[in-house]
Image: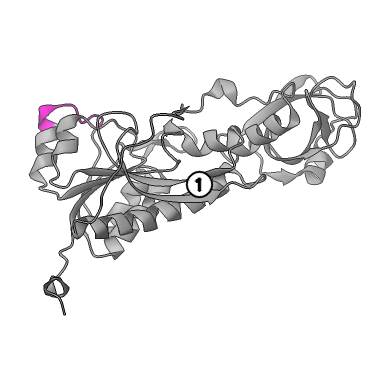
Amino acid sequence: MSGTDNIEEVPLRIIFMGTPAYAVPTLEALHAAGHEIVAVYSQPPRPAGRRGLELRPSPVHEAADALGVSVFTPKSLKSDEEQQAFRRLDADVAVVVAYGLLLPAPILDAPSLGAWNGHASLLPRWRGAAPIQRAIMAGDSQTGVMIMKMDEGLDTGPVALTKTMEITGHVTTGELHDRLSEITASLMVEAMARLERGELPVKPQAETGVTYAAKISKAETRVDFALPAVAVHNHVRGLSPTPGAWFEIRTGDRTERVKLLETEIIGMHDANATPGTVLDDRLAVACGEGAVRLLRLQKAGGKPLAAQEFLRGVSIPLGTVL
């Protein structure tokens, strides 16, 4: 038996920083692995409810409450007061997953072993806020998770661990989100175990292939049927289930917005049809090149419905231009 075999690993003192549901499995996995979660940082509670009168804690905040961990929700980490409070927690490491606030240098430097981020892309592709959506919308065939040591840049730090996965032609952002969330959790647990042992080397990101995953804007969620069918299909699945791609239809004397959650690419029925034209009674729609069939739709205030069920309540005649 070597001398190192008798060394007992000491759990890390971790500050966890995250906000949406995507980050919850990582928090729970680190806690289950025996690390001491000394505090959780999350974005402040947001207005919720039909009239926005309630303040709802983030999913990470709720998960931390369930674990009995103290939660801090500053609007910014730029003040000396917030930075001193962070340092007083005396953490070994900060783990960051979809937190949503920039971390200034004093925060990054406070933990003795640094700050480590779980990012849902194959960096340097899709740095930024919406890597899962952007990968699907761009038609990427592959994505993954990287564990990165953070610096002051936007997802520019050196990478320690990588896990890749394929993006199939029909997977939605919702489905890919859930799978990558679980991968992030398992990969971060592995990273922290290696960090405990001093066995987590990093290497710089490639200098080529940099792209940015800007936050999805409301303006770009409308479906543009003038695009090729493959682009329309990727746009729809990249925004499904939220925020959702949409188009408008005329019902009676008013225009109604319809969310489009699922499509498939089909052969063109009429090469001369104007993009957006409904080509048959099963919601085939002409695109700039080719056509798509609308498979799952949702009216405002309604629930998602398969196309044939949707058409029982909404008339979209042949020849309608969406």
Judging depth in this view, the residue of 50 and 260 nearest the camera is 260
Quarter where residue 128 is shown: top left
- What secondary structure do most residues of the magenta stretch adopt? loop
Q: Which residues are magenta?
A: 75-81
Residue 59 at x, y percent in the picture: 38, 47
Quarter where residue 34 is shown: bottom left
Q: Quadrant of the N terminus?
A: bottom left
Q: Is residue 83 left or right of residue 162?
A: left
Instruction: Give the residue at x 59% y 46%.
Output: 167
Judging depth in this view, the residue of 252 and 294 nearest the camera is 294
Name the residue tied to disc 1: 177
Q: Residue furthest front?
A: 2
Q: Is residue 206 above or below residue 115?
A: above
On whether residue 286 falls in the magenta region, the answer is no
Q: Which amino acid does the dot numbered 1 rest on?
A: His
Instruction: Give the residue at x 51% y 24%.
Output: 217
Q: Is residue 273 left or right of residue 36?
A: right
Q: Is residue 317 left or right of residue 72?
A: right
Q: Is residue 90 above or below residue 125?
A: below
Helix, strand or loop at label 1? It is: helix
Residue 204 at x, y percent in the picture: 31, 37
Quarter where residue 258 is shown: top right
Disc 1: CA contacts within 10 A as few (<14), some (14-19) or many (>=20) = some
Judging depth in this view, the residue of 49 and 114 nearest the camera is 114
Residue 188 at x, y percent in the picture: 33, 54
Instruction: Give the residue at x 47% y 32%.
Output: 51
Q: Is residue 239 visible?
A: no
On whether residue 78 falls in the magenta region, the answer is yes
Q: Quadrant of the C terminus?
A: top right
Q: Is residue 75 visible?
A: yes
